[in-house]
Amino acid sequence: MSGIGEGQRERSLGRSAPLLGVLLVLLAGWFGWSAVQQWRQEANGQALEEARDQAVQGLQEAAAGQLKQLQQQLKNERVQQALQAGDAAAAALAVRESWTGVEQVEVLGADLAAAYADPATFGYARLALLEEALAEGKPGLRVVRDAGGNRLGLAAPVQLGSLGPAVLYVRQPLLRLTSPLDQVSAPSTGFLGLRQGAHDLVAQGDAGLAESAEALARPVSGTPLRLVAAVPNVEAGPLGLGSLASAIVALLLAFVAVLLVVGRGRLPKTLPLPRRAAAAEADHGPTLSESLQMAPPPVAGASAEESAPPPPPPVPAGELAAGIFRAYDIRGVVGSELTPKTAALIGQAIGTVALEQGLREVVIGRDGRLSGPELAAGLAEGLRRTGCAVIDIGLAPTPVVYYAAFHLRTGTCVAVTGSHNPPEYNGFKVVIGGETLSGDAITDLYQRIFEGRLVQAAEPGDYQQRDVGADYIQRIADDVQLDRPLKVVADAGNGVAGALAPQLLEAIGAEVIPLYCDVDGTFPNHHPDPSEPANLEDLVQTIKRFGADLGVAFDGDGDRLGVVTGEGRIIYADRLLMLFAADVLMRNPGAMVIYDVKCTGKLSDHVLRNGGSPLMWKTGHSLMKAKMRETDAELAGEMSGHFFFKERWFGFDDGLYAAARLLEILAQREETPDEVLAELPEMVATPELKVPVAEGTPHALVAMLVAAAQSPDNPYVGGRLSTIDGLRVDFPDGWGLVRASNTTPVLVLRFEGNDEAALERIQALFRSQLQPVLGDTPLGF
């Protein structure tokens, strides 16, 4: 029997050999084809990197050549004579006539007043180029959007005779920079692009690879440009093998296939096979028993039907104080200026505007002020009068109200908050269709009420209550986690941020020591305004008592952040913005970073050194958010402690989220938080100084100071004037600012110098201009 069995196996092998041979040949072909494809992809990748490096070298030489020609033009005798005479037009003409092929030449005053008057038309990239040249004190270039297309822009700081600092701008055809790209060729399966910020200026190859091209990017030295490159991912061979391993396996399989075919002739051609019983009992096997069919029980409603608060009676529009409709929000004294009746009218006006934009759902929330519940009830009733549905999230920081509008997909929300004002104040921050209302849009609400242009629906809108606090915390914790634990003191100043801040910071991995985190609308311990150093004294002491790594403080509604180091040093918001900017720009090179006029003069340089585009803008959270949308900026910040992250967040001001991002950055570093924060550039500076003036006079007073600065007898000789928001004068060794507050009747001042002597000189200069205007009013410096 054993002989018959062996013969049967040999017979089977003999018949199977051709089939096995064919199978092995197919497998060998598969592995071989994979090896060839991988070799081709690797060769394409190498060719692409060689093309990229060649192009980078050519671009750097072209850029250096253009800058060298610009410097030569500045040495031109005609140009020098025109500049010394203060004749901007003659200087521009001299450059244009001696530099063949230039498209435009301008000489602009260092205040860039024309540019800031309409920056969108002037061009943000062009404005950033001029700011960079003035800040760095040397020529620079970048690609700008000008004359309806991409152009090469060059700029250099100059002295325009007795008129002071200025900047020369030259517009060239883009080809003068990008011509080296025409001399290289990217593989058709790859991608090669010249990129500035997030925009591809010139591209070759497969555009579908553009999003992954940063991995092989190389900077073009001396410019904000980089050359990005990408090839398709090299697909691993069968079983994850590389090209060499796949080739070896293919050869082995082919060899075995040959052996099978050649050896087949040695096997017996015929052998008798015994008949074997073919009838085998079919085995159907047991089937699974039928499972019991159970219908799921009906889901009960999430909550019982909520009843809205009783409607307040209507109030005549004439009783509404126009003064509560301010630049950034609606704010006034409760009882005399704000009541549930006026809140209802304001809600009705907001609902009317929302309906005109096709929006029918509005999220509302309130901070911890004692007047919050009754004003929120009045607001809800007014909104419902228009037919709008109200989603009330109750007690919540303002940024959580903003978040709820995104999370619940309403796009519209109202936060009932007095922000950092005294307890007797309250107000409303309004977002309609994703846009925070300010200026004329807020004034329009008053006009609608005064003129009776309000919608009155036949049936009131729905009312429901929701809690989104847990969703807010989870959303942040899913994205932000600390690499190592940090001990943090969180001071909410008895504001509404105390309801969530400790839980949020613990959720991302911090050890939290809460300070004044019980919500109390009387603010019994200190005023919730972290921009005032006096309000941080308890935080400093608590940090030292517990040996904490850091302290964070929030304002009354949680949209602003203050920071104190473990050593008790206050880190002002403009220095924090430097840290945030460096972090964001690592992932978003070339991105726009916006800061307000109260921020340090070192901020612009810091953003530029980290590969970003800085833009100084007007103070005000709503103005900042509007400018971010207009410029597509990734980050913005104000000296007051408002931080706006579009990268990984929603672009609204959020003190709690900013605290989480700060801890994330600090936990990634090996140094202590004190050491990391000490590395940030610092100058001798004052905090915000506030000079009380008569109601209604701040803007007129600032206008007088601006007029004097722009007169022929300009007292700020050698300084660069900026009038986008008040009067800011930048000197080589410091700067000073005076602006009118848009929320209270005060003048806001701030000064900074490289040293105490520079600071005192700049303060004395401003003092000499302020005293004749303000008379005996104490200046505080």
Image: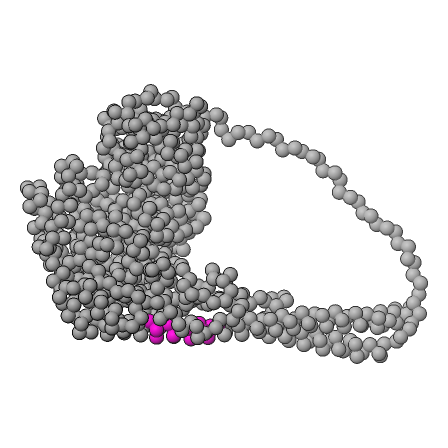
Q: Nearer the viewer, residue 200 or 309?
A: 200
User: How many numbered discs sit on the rendered protein?
Assistant: 0
Residue 158, quarter of the rendered image: bottom left
Q: Which residues are the magenta region?
A: 48-63
As drawn, is 715 to the left or to the right of 254?
left
Q: As displayed, is residue 711 above or below residue 558?
A: below
Q: Nearer the viewer, residue 572 or 762?
A: 762
x and y percent of residue 573 in the render? Answer: 26, 50
665 part of magenta stretch: no
Q: What is the magenta segment's predominant secondary structure?
A: helix
As drawn, is 439 to the left or to the right of 691?
right
Residue at the far top in the pictured view: 313
Residue 715, quarter of the rendered image: bottom left
As drawn, is 25 to the left or to the right of 649?
right
55 part of magenta stretch: yes
Can residue 610 be spotted in the picture? yes
x and y percent of residue 34 in the render? Answer: 62, 70
Residue ID at (26%, 65%): 105
Residue ID at (43%, 36%): 358
x and y percent of residue 23 in the render? Answer: 74, 69
Q: Which color scheme is applied?
A: one colour
Q: As displayed, is residue 714 above or below residue 420?
A: below
Can residue 368 be spotted in the picture? no
> Looking at the figure, which quarter contains the N terminus?
bottom right
Residue ID at (85%, 76%): 267
Residue ID at (43%, 35%): 359
Q: As displayed, is residue 355 above or below residue 659?
A: above
Q: Nearer the viewer, residue 695 or 272?
A: 695
x and y percent of residue 478 in the render? Answer: 45, 48
Q: Nearer the viewer, residue 338 or 502?
A: 338
Q: As displayed, is residue 741 above or below residue 128?
A: above
